[in-house]
Amino acid sequence: MDAGCGGALLFDHSRGARIGLPEAVFCEGKSAEILFSLLERGMDKESPILFTRLSQEVFESAPQNIRVAYDYHGLSRTAFVGQLPRKKTGSAAVVSAGSADARVAWEAARTLEYLGIAVDMYEDNGVAGLWRLTSKLEIIASAEAIIVAAGLDAALASVLGGLTGKPIFAVPTSVGYGVAKGGKSALLSMLASCAPGIGVMNIDNGYGAACAAARVINLLNQKIETGGR
């Protein structure tokens, strides 16, 4: 099989041992032919692979054996055959400002699910109606890591950052009119947040936020396994 069919594209199966995060395939920009080859090769439940940014159109045109084997989620554009073993401790909360942020928020949630991390989703918590957030704050803050997905002025990240000391990973989304500039205003707002210690991801990078949260939760589990050392 030549490189044009995905034959020279090698899965990094040792990544999990190195950094605690397994292989994932970014599908956007790859041809359907290459993706079908990779999906075929990624059907081993013993070495699960996460596929991100896999469009519903491409997935629905895949051979039937692929479509039947994979757990595909159209909104998040993610697919996997198997998940990693469930973590013994630690959970994450994914909080979005509005339903327009759902693709990014669900990409994060699905990535956490694939990584074996308990995750709860809290949608539509924009600060224009602050009561929506404050009514859920106690349960959101009970998670070991929090992911915030927000576009427009992205104020949700600063507000949450000022209300809880839990690790927060903020994802600007490409949502908004005019000066929102495809998420650039949200990105700058999060970077300029007056709430100290917020980690900011790239625009629309729900996958990256989930991996950042997973590093925190992996560390908690490692401490348990080593007796707190």
Image (cartoon, grey):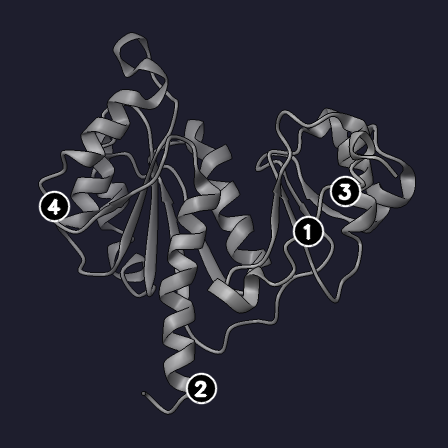
Of badges 3 and 2, nearer the viewer stands: 3
Residue 216 against residue 43 in the figure, above or below: below
Q: Quadrant of residue 28?
A: top right
Residue at mark 2: 225
| Residue ID at (40%, 85%) | 224
Of badges 4 and 2, nearer the viewer stands: 2
Residue 46 placed where, x, y %? 74, 67
| Residue ID at (31%, 61%) | 139
Of badges 3 and 1, nearer the viewer stands: 1
Q: Are marks 4 and 3 in contact (CB under 8 Å)?
A: no
State the CA–CA distance, disc 3 to disc 1: 9 Å
Quarter of the figure with the C terminus:
bottom left
State the CA–CA distance, disc 4 to disc 3: 42 Å
Q: Earlier in the sequence, mark 3 or mark 1?
A: 1
Secondary structure under badge 4?
A: loop
Residue at mark 4: 195
Q: Amino acid at mark 3?
A: Leu
Residue at mark 1: 11
| Residue ID at (39%, 67%) | 217
Is residue 26 among the parts visible in the rendering?
Answer: yes
Quarter of the figure with the N terminus:
top right
Q: Amino acid at mark 2?
A: Glu
Of badges 4 and 3, nearer the viewer stands: 3
Secondary structure under badge 3?
A: helix
